[in-house]
Amino acid sequence: MTFDTREVAKRIRSGRIAKNMTQMQLADEMGVSYQAVSNWERGNSMPDISKLGDLCEVLDMSVDELLGGEMAGVIRKAERKEKQAPAPGDAEGNPGPEGEAEEPRDPEDRGLSPEELAAVAPLLLPGDILRLAGETEKEEGETDWDMLLMLAPFLDEEALDELIGETEDVKTDMSHIVALAPFLGEKTLNRLALKAVDEDVPELVGLAPFLSSDKLKELVRRAMGRSRK
């Protein structure tokens, strides 16, 4: 289940034309740039989830009509999770800066599945993706590599490094790490490469194109030192 961005782009364009609006006029109504609307209608990007309600109101259509029924359901689930997110300092449900206690969470409202989160990622801000990824349905302490591969294009290096965390089983996970390498930061790549050398992981060669020449020389020296022991 993923967005068909081309179909959504067509619906935005058709809805705008049906309202006899220019792209500039729609941009003004939405409080975004003309380039943003242009990118929406070309399928290059998607409106942020916080803009969906306003966009549907301006175009006089429902979220289901804009995104499709199944995807709209996932969006509504993501919106509920956003509304339930505690304010800073409210992790225990204590009064927030306004002096109001956080509403109790519905125990049946579980986190998004990795597939659902990846599907709505084009509509979410990087910070929201990072937070929701920490609430996805997975085993505690387990790195969900499939989810990371799906989310990688929507996250910066720092956020992706945080989701990877302290990976211990490099030998088992190296194929996933190599697949993620184009998106990883230098610090994380170097750390994982050193662990791979220490654990004698042959797939380490897959990281070579993403490492600096100095780091490669260091890894070679380290590997040769291990082989002499």
Image (cartoon, grey):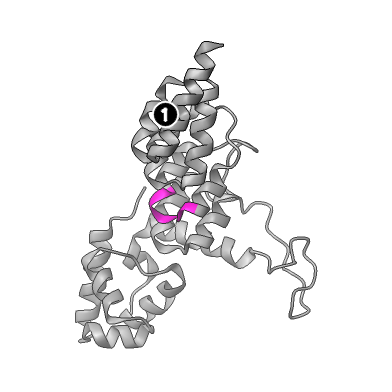
213 vs 29: above or below: above
Residue found at x 45% / y 58%: 73
Q: Which residues are magenta?
A: 151-157
Residue 16: x percent and y percent?
24, 79
The quadrant of the picture occupied by the C terminus is top right
Q: Is residue 150 rendered magenta in the image?
A: no
Residue found at x 61% / y 50%: 110
Q: Label 1 neighbourhood size at 10 Å, few (<14), some (14-19), many (20+)? A: some
Q: Is 10 positioned to the left or the right of 148 in the image? A: left
The answer, for residue 229, to whether it is visible in the render is: yes
Residue under label 1: 175
Residue type at mark 1: give it: Ser
Residue 140: x percent and y percent?
65, 38
Q: Is residue 152 rendered magenta in the image?
A: yes
Q: How many marks?
A: 1
48 vs 71: above or below: below
Residue found at x 46% / y 43%: 148
113 vs 100: above or below: above
Q: Is 185 positioned to the left or the right of 96 in the image? A: left
Residue 58: x percent and y percent?
34, 83
Q: Is 77 positioned to the left or the right of 154 in the image? A: right
**What's the magenta bit mostly, secondary-structure-wise?**
helix
The answer, for residue 113, to whether it is visible in the render is: no
Q: Nearer the viewer, residue 163 or 216?
A: 216
Q: Nearer the viewer, residue 13 or 194?
A: 194
Label 1 secondary element: helix
Q: Is 183 positioned to the left or the right of 99 in the image? A: left
Residue 64: x percent and y percent?
37, 65
Residue found at x 54% / y 55%: 130
